[in-house]
Amino acid sequence: MLTDPLAEAIAEAEKLVEAAPHIRSEQDLLEGYQYLAGGILATVHAAWATEKTHPNFIQGTGPYTKMGLDNPDTLYFGARVNDDAEYVVSGTRGTTTDLSFQVLSGNYTDSNVPGSETAFDDRAIDIAPDGTFEVRFGPANEDGSPYGGGRRNHFTLGTGASQLVVREVYSDWSQQRGTIRIERVDRMGVPYDALTKEETEKRFARAGKALVGRVKTWLQFPEWFYLKLPVNTMTEPRLTPGGLATQFSSVGHYELADDQAMIITVPKSDAPYVGFQLGSMWYISLDYTGHQTSLNNTQAQVDPDGMVRMVVSERNPGVTNWIETVGHPRGILQFRWQRTSRELAPADGPTVEVVGIDEVAAKLPFHEQNKITPEDWTARIAARQAAIADRMLG
C-alpha cells in the first residue's frame, strides 16, 4: 500500500515516544501521544502542501502541531526553497512588534542544527507607506557578486539553502497579523504537475521520515541546551543558537514540588519584545490559551523599581505575574529578547530564587501591588483565549 511507509514511521515514532527518558507519570506519556498526534498532522500536511516548484508558506507550528519550544507570542511560517532558483516574497506588514526572515541550510536533526545563511528583520528592507513590501531571494551571480547587486530588498541564497522561515512576533496579543506569500519566479503562471503514483508514494514516505526525524530531534534539544545546566537556574542572556540576528535568550530548567515556587526577577528591558515561557519535557510550550504559562513585556506587571517579578508555581500565589506549571513539576524555562539594538549584558538577565509557596508574599517587595482578585484573573485568561482565537491559530 502507498501509505505503508507512513504507517511504519508512525509505529516507530510511537515507540520513541514511549521510551522517552523523561517520562515519570501517565500524564507525561499521554502528553507524548498528544505530541505525536501533532507531529503526524504537521508532517503529513507539509508533505502535501509544500512544493519546491510552487512553494507556499505553511504554518510550521501551532496549538495542535507544537514543536521546538514554540513561542506563544510568535506565528511561524516556512517554505521550501532551492539554492539555484529566484523567489519573490511579498505581503503587507501587520502591526506585530517584529517580522523576521531567516534562510536555513539543511534541516534540524538529532545530530545537527541547520546553518543560518541569512537572518534579518524588517528594519533591513524597504516597506511602502501602505505597509506593502516585496523581498527577493536568489543565487549569487556567476562572478560571485551578491544577488541583485547588493540592492535593498535583495538577498543571496547561499549554497545549500533549503528553507525560508518567517516569524511574526506579538508583544501585544491584540496586534494584527500581516499577509505574506512566496512565488518562484520561473514558475509564475505555470500550473502544477499532475500527481503520479510515484509522487504520491514519495510524499507518504517523506511524511514518515519527517515524523521520525521530528521526534528524535526535539527529544535531543533539551539534552543539548538545557538539562546539563544546574536545575532551577537560568543562563545569562546570549545570542540565540541558530542565527536569529537580533534575538538573545536566557534558558534553564526547573523542578519544583507542589509547595515550592520560583521567583524570577528581571529588569524591564528596552528591547521591543521580551517574552518568557515554560515548556514541557517534550520541548513544547505548555497550554498558553487557558492558562498563563507565558508572559511578555506588554502583559507582565512591572514593579515601581523597574523590575518584573514572576512567580512560577503549581499552587496559585494570588499575584498578577503568576506563571502556571499546570501539573508539570519539571520543565523548561526560556526568555527571549528580540529586535534588540545592543548587546545584552548579564545585568539584563534574570535572577532566580526557589522558596516555599507560603514565603512568596514576604519575598515580593511590592506584594500589595502584585495581588490580583479571582475575577481579574479570570478576565486575564479570557483575554488570552480571545486573542488566540482572533489569530486563527487552529
Image (cartoon, rainbow, N blue to C red):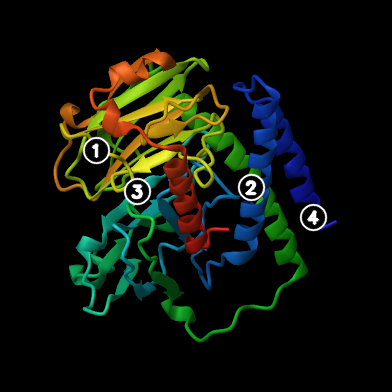
For the residue labelled by badge 3, is the local secondary structure a helix, a strand or a loop?
Answer: strand
Other residues around mark 2 within 10 Å, as few (<14) / some (14–19) / many (≥20): some
For the residue labelled by badge 1, is the local secondary structure a helix, a strand or a loop?
Answer: loop
Judge from the rendering whether residue 363 lies leftward or rightward of residue 330; answer left or right: left
Q: Give the mark nearer the N terminus: 4 vs 1.
A: 4
Observer-side mark, 2 or 1, equals 1
For the residue labelled by badge 2, is the local secondary structure a helix, a strand or a loop?
Answer: helix
Indicate which disc residue 3 carries: 4
Q: Which residue was labeled with disc 2?
A: 38
Q: Give the mark nearer the N terminus: 3 vs 4.
A: 4
Indicate which disc residue 302 carries: 1
Other residues around mark 4 within 10 Å, as few (<14) / some (14–19) / many (≥20): some
Indicate which disc residue 226 carries: none
Residue 132 screen position, x and y as percent? 30, 77
Q: Which residue was labeled with disc 3?
A: 116
* Residue 195, above or below 221: below
Image quarter of the C terminus: bottom right
* Residue 177, above or below 361: below
Q: Give the mark nearer the N terminus: 4 vs 2.
A: 4
Of 237 and 73, nearer the camera is 73
Q: Quadrant of residue 253?
A: top left
Q: Residue at x 31, y 32 (%)?
A: 370
Residue 164 screen position, x and y as percent? 41, 59
